[in-house]
Amino acid sequence: MKPRQKRFVYIIVAVAAIGLAVGLVLNALKDNVSLYFTPTQVYNKEAPEGRSFRIGGLVEAGSVKREADGLTVHFAITDLHKSLPVVYKGILPDLFKEGKGVVAQGKIEADGLMHASEVLAKHDENYMPPEAKDALDKAAAANAAATGAASSVGAASAVPVAQ
Amino acid sequence: MIPELGLFSLIIALCLAIILGVLPILGAARNNAVFMGVARPLAYGQLLMIALAFAALAYAFLHNDFSVLYVAEHSNSQLPSIYRFSAIWGGHEGSLLLWTLLLAVWTAAVATFSKHLPDEMVARVLGVMGLISVGFILFMLLTSCPFDRLLPAAADGRDLNPLLQDPGLVIHPPMLYMGYVGFSVAFAFAISALLGGKLDATWARWSRPWTTVAWVFMTCGIALGSGWAYYELGWGGWWFWDPVENASFMPWLLGTALIHSLAVTEKRGAFKSWTVLLAIAAFSLSLLGTFLVRSGVLTSVHSFAADPKRGIFILSFLVLVVGASLLLFAWRAPKVGLGGKFDAISRESLLLSNNVLLSVASASVFIGTLYPLFMDALGYGKLSVGAPYFQAVFVPLMIPMVFMMGLGPLARWKKMAVPDLVQRVKWGFAAALVLALVLPLVMGKMLVLESNKWSPMIALGLLMAFWVIASLFISLRQRLSGEGSFMLRVSKQSLSYYGMQLAHLGVAVFIIGVTMVKGYETERDVRMNVGDTVMAGGYEFRFDGVTESEGPNYVAGVGHVTISQDGKVVSELNPEKRQYNVSGMPLTEAAIQPGLFRDLYVSLGEPIPESEGAWAVRVYIKPFVDWIWAGCLLMGLGGILAISDRRYRIHRKAAEQKSVAGSSDSSSVVYNTPQEQAS
């Protein structure tokens, strides 16, 4: 092969390799990204149906119930305005507690419950998962906007501030 | 008083670092021997000052000085003293100080072990490291000073996160940081080579041992972290593709590419620009990793409170480092040239392909880790990228990589005829293939796995591992067969050759571990009453209840689980559920009975309310899981073997002899080329 042809082959191979890698990445991203929603958003039917997503908020006080098998747990995740019932079978993380921040991943099934495949609580007592905090902030802001809207149009500027 | 002294020495260290970052580089440019000469003393002075600052913080921790804010937030008088010491790096400020200390250690090490290097080179390398140090000390002083006072002083501290009260966490961060910071040496060498315009085989030979040492530390650091997650988080997993794990994995992947590319640059003079680019990228990712982890931008176990001021400083520093070095690269690289030519099938081309694959793998991890951050910043909402993404991308990239890893050491430099290469490997590959296909069908009984199970992934994983081992044997046979004494030929091979093979064997062992644990693990979450039994993987686990016990700063429920096989008691495990006194945080402490072929793993979930002492219990059988860390250990040992190679020492001796002989021109030292690739 002449040097020019050779270089051409190298370039083709390189482009093919990069193309393959990009394809892999995009394909994997498409299937494995899960979006976050707040309980209010789920209540407003913004969450996808039949697809797994994440929800953040607090474990509603008094909502944790165990089935007789000792492993299936029912609880509700709340943003203090709306809440979503969740069922999870398995061992919960150490820091799972009523009134504390939590993130759950799962699907809403026909029974209207979220069947969680994963429940996360963070590894520090005082730490709130940002998604949970975000849900609380959004709900609080939306609520403030809803009550304020009657008197002032400018209430829409109450943009939720997420840290 | 002591903390103020610490702060004071930190400020002096900053001044020294600034002079170190300016004068020697200027001196190298103007050929001013005095300016260049200050580099070494400044490097030692900087180390002394930062060591003093570190000692001051250590003193505050050991003496429970809760008038220091950082101590009050991360320690407690009940804490055992070893954890009071390791609490120094239990938070953001202290880990930065540790980072800076290690950077000063590396700088001083370069100053000490560079007697054979030309003065301009030493001046530039130390200067660049001084500049990095300036960035870090400034970051500490401006945004996160560990010596800030808390007035009035707290009566007692808030305690160290219980997860961090573990021997593994005493050594994991320093190890990992040694790796992160070590890549700064490779980076500094690359930058000074660009500045000096001399990128040649000598430059590669100088930076090789440094890069390998950093890589060894990083390998061990990551392995320790993974081991810690395995036994401490109580989930039985060893890698979670957590953002923080990824942050250390990205520079590791690039560092792996870098040590291979440096080898080519040294031996063949090829890949020069690529090597420089890798050195820059590896260090930039180390910086990104440190900052991502410590700034709290990414949520994970490791992140601490976020402070916007920190984020901005970090971003500016990163942009400055990456931008400046890339600019320098764009300016100087055309002069560097491409180096030796090689054919489409040759050892060079195989190494290059693997370099590309490792870099692409690193990039794909990068995308997965930072994608949520970008999407959030752009206002597309919050999302998360799960572990399946990383597996889906990473595994397909690693399969060709491991295949070529087996071919590489067997191929000749420059040019290799394909039929010749095929001839060399065909029996080895066939043997690996047969073993990989048949073994899963028969090994179940032998290794006490739950059953014989054949799946494509298991066969593929085993094929990869056996292929690497087969290639190792072929290579050894080629090198060690021939006329004359066998022992002589064994001792004639260079240590770096054995190091390389040992590290590759480590990869094979690692792959076996991953394949087996993924393919055959058994996990059971069960509710157990006192006296209940559960079967898993041929073992019977009997739950004998939970008793109370008291630790130095916690109370624990200690579970009693008796494990028997075929009616014979194998072991009793005592998993704990601890409650720490000060923070009130609960913690699961798994109990593990390790073994060559399987780990038995039990951890306590939670007590079942309204029952008589029943608990939710996790019972795992993890076949071959320890092979994962054994593989990492072998890789690390391989690295150590490679840098103890004779030629790095001979080289130094030759330089010493020269300087004794009164020659001032140390850049022309004679270099003994080891006999390379006999075949």
Image (cartoon, coloured by chain):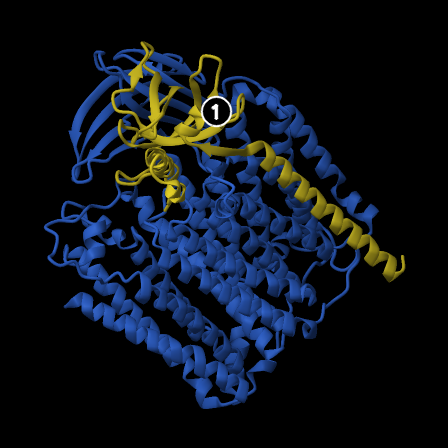
Chain colours: A yellow, B blue
Q: Mark 1 points at which residue?
A: A45
- Left of B243 or right of it: where is A78? left
Left or right relative to B518: residue B556 = left
- Note whether residue B274 is visible: yes
> Considering the image in quadrants, where does the N terminus of chain A appear?
bottom right
Identified at 43% across, 69% down, the residue is B132
Question: In the figure, B123 relative to B366: above or below?
Answer: below
Q: Which residue is drawn at 34% across and 22% down?
A: A76
x, y percent for residue A70: 32, 14
Residue B160 spot, x, y in % from top left: 24, 46
Q: Nearer the viewer, residue B185 or B473?
A: B185
Judging from the image, mark 1 belongs to the subunit labelled A
Q: In which quarter of the image is residue B37?
A: bottom left
Residue at the far top in the pictured view: A68
Q: How crowded is mark 1: few (under 14 residues within 10 Å), some or many (20 or more)?
A: few
Residue B135, percent across and down?
A: 40, 68
The residue tagged with tag 1: helix, strand or loop? loop
Dividing the picture into quarters, in which one does residue B530 lie?
A: top left
What is the total number of numbered labels drawn onto the structure image?
1
Left or right: B131 with respect to B579? right
- The three-letter amino acid code for the residue at tag 1 is Lys
